[in-house]
Image (tube, coloured by chain):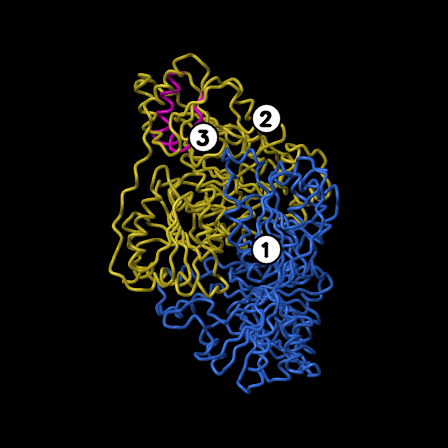
Chain colours: A yellow, B blue
Amino acid sequence: MNGAESLVRTLADSGVDVCFANPGTSEMHFVAALDRLDLIYCVLALQENVATGAADAYARMTGQPAATLLHLGPGFGNGLANVHNAKKARVPMVNIVGEHATYHIEYDAPLTSDIQGIVGPVSDYVVTTKTAEDVGADTAKAVAKAKTWPGKIATLILPADAAWNETSYVGVPLLADPPEKVIPADVEAVAKALKSGKKAVMFMSGAVLYGEGLEKAGKVAAATGATLLAQTSNRRIDRGAGRVAVNKLPYPIDHALETLKDYEVVILLGANEPVGFFAYPNKPSRLSPDGAEILNLAGPNQNTLEALDMLIDALGAQDAEPELVEAEPAPDVSGLSGPITPEIISLAFRANMPADAIVVDESITTGRAFFPDSRAAPPHTWLQNTGGAIGVGMPYAVGAAMACPDRRVIVLQSDGSGMYCNQALWTMAREGLDVTVLIFSNRAYRILEGEMKGVGVDKMGHVAEGLFGLNQPEIDWVSLAKGMGVEATRVDDAADLSPAIADALSREGPYLIEIVF
Amino acid sequence: MNGAESLVRTLADSGVDVCFANPGTSEMHFVAALDRLDLIYCVLALQENVATGAADAYARMTGQPAATLLHLGPGFGNGLANVHNAKKARVPMVNIVGEHATYHIEYDAPLTSDIQGIVGPVSDYVVTTKTAEDVGADTAKAVAKAKTWPGKIATLILPADAAWNETSYVGVPLLADPPEKVIPADVEAVAKALKSGKKAVMFMSGAVLYGEGLEKAGKVAAATGATLLAQTSNRRIDRGAGRVAVNKLPYPIDHALETLKDYEVVILLGANEPVGFFAYPNKPSRLSPDGAEILNLAGPNQNTLEALDMLIDALGAQDAEPELVEAEPAPDVSGLSGPITPEIISLAFRANMPADAIVVDESITTGRAFFPDSRAAPPHTWLQNTGGAIGVGMPYAVGAAMACPDRRVIVLQSDGSGMYCNQALWTMAREGLDVTVLIFSNRAYRILEGEMKGVGVDKMGHVAEGLFGLNQPEIDWVSLAKGMGVEATRVDDAADLSPAIADALSREGPYLIEIVF
């Protein structure tokens, strides 16, 4: 057994069953070991942000880390933005980064770089394996680190000689460290504030937005009248008919300030205090109202589910009945026609939402109505870009569809951000994933027009127009998709939109609709 | 004047006239200043490796740094691989990386990251501007650092408030530090070795491979019989009829060892000693023969052109006549037909090479004959991937065409690496660049099949086949190009290849040929 085989066996024994990969020479022994052992399913990505974005979404949907396989420092660099996003999502992820053989590094060959330096800023844990003998223990520890609540980015740097030399050790799976303890006094303080009659909001993110966490939060809201509010971007929200509804803090800073302005108590649960996505001249960074009491119930590294249990006990809210969203019928879209608008897209999307869909939302400006408009749709899961580095939509769809092959994945994809990782379309076709991609082809980085005003620049000149416009030439998404093996159609009349979405959702495998408006 | 305007004025005063950009909110004031002042031409890239790759090639062709404009840590991360390649090319480059307003960083908003940590490993010089008052001096210093011989990567991190606050300072352009001195004793030792009658090779890279450097090297070769050999990958080689010919060290390690095995003296000029691109089990990292004398004439940071002058003096070779390549007629390709092979592609390419072309070579396995076969073609310039991070071909073409609008750019592009930065096609169309892209559509990461054997793995299983194959689905480059506004055609019969290339070269603007074989 060589080090590479020890790595594969240890990963598999530790519960890692999928690897999103773009390997190179230094990783060939790992590839060979994957082949011999056949314990881990490998998915090829043609650009590394596809691999890292897919691993992120896979973890969001399964709770378990996927592995990525990346080629030295620059290969990790290509996937760095989506590792950044994954770190902000607080998901488990295990990155395997190949390195030159240890003795070769000093010669500064072309691909030599400071890999530890490159991976460090976006990893929670980094280990460079020194020898084949160390691979097993290092890998087991990396996976355990990744699984540390609520989820960490663990990066293992694997020198080629550590992969090809012999070893007799396979790593023994390790237990992850437990989450940080919830502090009873914090729970008491929150319970007291909630009983005080002050207007309170629970500002939430992480595991309390899906599964049992959501129901627990709903009990607290039902018992106290507190508002449940998710942060602007979250790794996962389960929602729709029959579930507890949680709104999100709006992205535009004026809307965010307006949303929060009347609260006297801000309770943090799995989230840090609300802050602006960006700073704007003469606007605050901190968004809670002046004088509001800010209470930490449980931070992201604490056990937010346990915190809710403790709070429910403190409130005596065990029997409170969470308010659940009542199903509403799909809107009638039969009369739509004419030019398409964001509002019409939202209607047509909502009208066709199937049960149990996974919605990947990278719709930026086009999609601001999608979330509220789909509040009472059939139950579904909502995935967002948590780190602000655009280009996640289609990679997330790959990972979500790999994680949940029985669920339909719908990508709400703005055109500018979609171009960053268009290569994800190819992987969708290769794996035959049931993904419906809606491209919002407004042919601009529309958000930047607003941001420019937001930072105090009122006049757009030709440079700004040149840097924000995607209209010269127009991107032809139907051809682009076809180029990567994904069938596609274009819609530019509202009358055709809902039928096109219905058709796409009925198909097996990936399908793209370019919505021109 | 705000800090952003000070930045633009200082860049322009320091000779930076092009900016390859993908801006975001934190860079809006910089965009507004670019607009108001109109001193720097801005080119939009839809993914940041396009911007950084283009800036690299622009510098290769002009000798001057371009600026890049990138959006915080993840935006730089998206362009990191091509900054890595640029650092290995030793070109000047000035990266402007936006950052949150200084007071906003502590709140850990979604896009907050350790930008200094991310940019550091691939930058030679990093400065984070603190206030608007500092922008001018920091920028002038960054440009001067970038221009330090032979070319450095300077990265300036610009907080949003340093851009939007007022200042009265514009930076005064600074002189770059001079190159490190050549050591006369080193020159003497090389002259002595060259006169000794021992079999000698000058192992070269950098400025000695183009312009006057090449002619000086040719004088040394003519006077002493030394072999001129470039390293495997170089930022630029001027070559073809009427020029001094320089071969390159082959990439495959066995060929490289064979090429060097008989030399008794290895003279380093702008290059480090020859080493393997990767390490392979039971093969050496250092490629010079055991016992060969390795002499440093001038390292990459020394003035290699001055070193050649000193060596010519020491050899008394002022009047030596460099051996120049005699023009050879283009091969007759009229009889070609049937399946296309790499050899046929090389013939058809050579047959159509126009004078003064800039050839960007990212042909990987397909292109191993292109360089030798074009030795006696009309004079042209050859650009290569210097850092081994694939995906440079089409971005380099953007930068080279921006730098030299009167020259035809031809990209020799393998399919796997081409997919990394396919977004460059859109920028070619937008700017109307005269670029001819030849895609070698063998539908595989063919090099990895060889590398797998090279590291001692003989058997490819289904995992390796899955990770190396680009055939499921086949990438349709004609559709892909059309999707980004670039006209294209597909050729799969040898009879059609040369006419297709001739047609493409006669067109204005970009054109792509997918060569299926």
Residue extent of the magenta highlight = A201-224
Label 2, residues with CA under 10 Å away: few <14, some 14-19, many ≥20 = few
Majority secondary structure of the magenta segment? helix
Left/right of residue A195 with respect to residue B496 in the rendered view: left
Residue at (49, 78) in percent of width and height:
B293
Left/right of residue B176 with respect to residue A322 in the rendered view: right
Three-letter code, disc 2: Asp
**Residue A497 image label:** none
Up/down of B205 relative to A123, above or below: below
Identify residue for label 1. Answer: B153
Res A264 seen here: yes
Which tag is nearer the camera, tag 1 or tag 3?
Answer: 1
Q: Chain of mark 3?
A: A
Q: Secondary structure at mark 1?
A: strand
Three-letter code, disc 1: Ile
Residue at (55, 53) in percent of width and height:
B123
Res B345 seen here: no
Identify residue for label 3. Answer: A272
Up/down of B433 relative to A218, above or below: below
Residue B245 in the image: state x and y as whole percent. Answer: 63, 78
Q: Is residue B108 rendered magenta in the image?
A: no
